[in-house]
Amino acid sequence: MIGCQDRNPLVSIVVPTFNHAKYLPEAIDSLLGQSYSNLEIIILDDGSTDNTRTILEGYGNKIRWETQSNMGHSRTLNKGWRMSRGDVIGYLNADDILYPDAIRISVEYLQDNASAVGCYPNFLIIDPDSRRVRSVSAPSFDIYKMITQFECAPGPGALFLKSAFERAGGWNEELKQTQDFEYWLRLARYGNLIHIPFELAAFRVHERSQSFGNIAFAAADEPIAVIESYYQNNQIPEELLHIKKQALANAHFVAAQLHLRSARYWPAIIRIADAISMSPISFCSKRILRVLAHGLFYRPLHRLSWLLRRS
């Protein structure tokens, strides 16, 4: 059965944290300040070497927490979700924020959509000092766009049913860069992911955030591996079978973007050449040019923005 049947379900939010003591209190306080009261907060300290433990001890019994040896983001999330008691589950990165009505509104959307296995809102991008950078209006969930444009619609604030998690399995613990993308693709086999057209979360970009730092070589190539794996599955919707080359070409462009962000120019050129050989027309799209420009200028533009805001 899919859909949220309970009118007041327990919601479990897992917060994995590794050396994010600077931002962790803001994340926890945003959960404690929720207007939805039936909430379980699970903080998993993944081997931090800063003062994270002291911060967690200061919250007493308001949260459920434990410290562990470092095991990585995906494995930590899977552990937290398996130990959770809620019928609805989600996560919050230790440097992100949920707005006060986020969980209440999300639960209402799950209750009002009988075919839903999850939901996700619009969100705000904030800088290291919690200042507004820009709003992100997340698109409606669309498998076709995910495959052909590598569009990952769900972002911060996403919730999903524990029952769907138990069917789909957890995040792929081998992936380091695209684990969320791969998971939403897999979860969507069991029901719909509903877009909430309200800004309910904030995503922080800073020097130590995963989306900002250097990306390992293998992690940069994950988009290719994810699409190849997707097409090896025998449950592919028929309308997606004929776009395999386009999907793989786009995955190579995204891999090129990630290599560019880490200043690996020759691997990026090779991925671009492979993409063009698979789907020459793809190189003409404006989106691909934006993808490549993003790879080159993402970090310099953010650093310039932070400098200007602080001056």
Image (cartoon, rainbow, N blue to C red):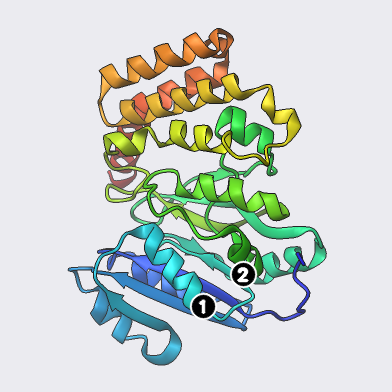
Taking the spot 43% from the left edge, 84% from the top edge, the residue there is 63
Q: Residues within 10 Å of mark 1 (few under 14, many from 20)?
A: many
The residue lying toward the viewer, choosing from 205 and 111, is 111
Q: Is residue 243 above or below residue 62?
A: above
Taking the spot 49% from the left edge, 27% from the top edge, the residue there is 251
Q: Quadrant of the N terminus?
A: bottom right
Mark 1 touches mark 2? (CB < 8 Å): yes
Q: Quadrant of residue 162?
A: bottom right
Q: Is residue 107 above or below residue 298?
A: below
Left or right position of 85 against 69: right
> Any mark on residue 238, and which?
none
Left or right position of 273 against 183: left
Q: Percent x, y for residue 145?
A: 64, 32
Query: Can the viewer see residue 195 in this picture?
Result: no
Taking the spot 34% from the left edge, 44% from the top edge, the residue there is 309
> Any mark on residue 84, and which?
1
Give the labeled residue for mark 2.
162
Q: Quadrant of residue 20?
A: bottom left
Q: How many marks?
A: 2
Q: Is residue 299 above or below residue 183?
A: above
- Dot 2 falls on a residue whose secondary structure is helix
Query: Can the viewer see residue 186 in this picture?
Result: yes
> What type is the residue that disc 1 sits on?
Ser
Taking the spot 75% from the left edge, 29% from the top edge, the residue there is 239
Q: Percent x, y for residue 219?
A: 34, 39
Compute the Cα span from label 1 to label 2.
9 Å
> What type is the residue that disc 2 sits on?
Lys
Q: Quadrant of residue 256?
A: top left
Residue farthest to the bottom, as pictured? 61
Q: Percent x, y for residue 290?
A: 49, 22
Left or right position of 107 against 70: right
Left or right position of 78 against 102: left
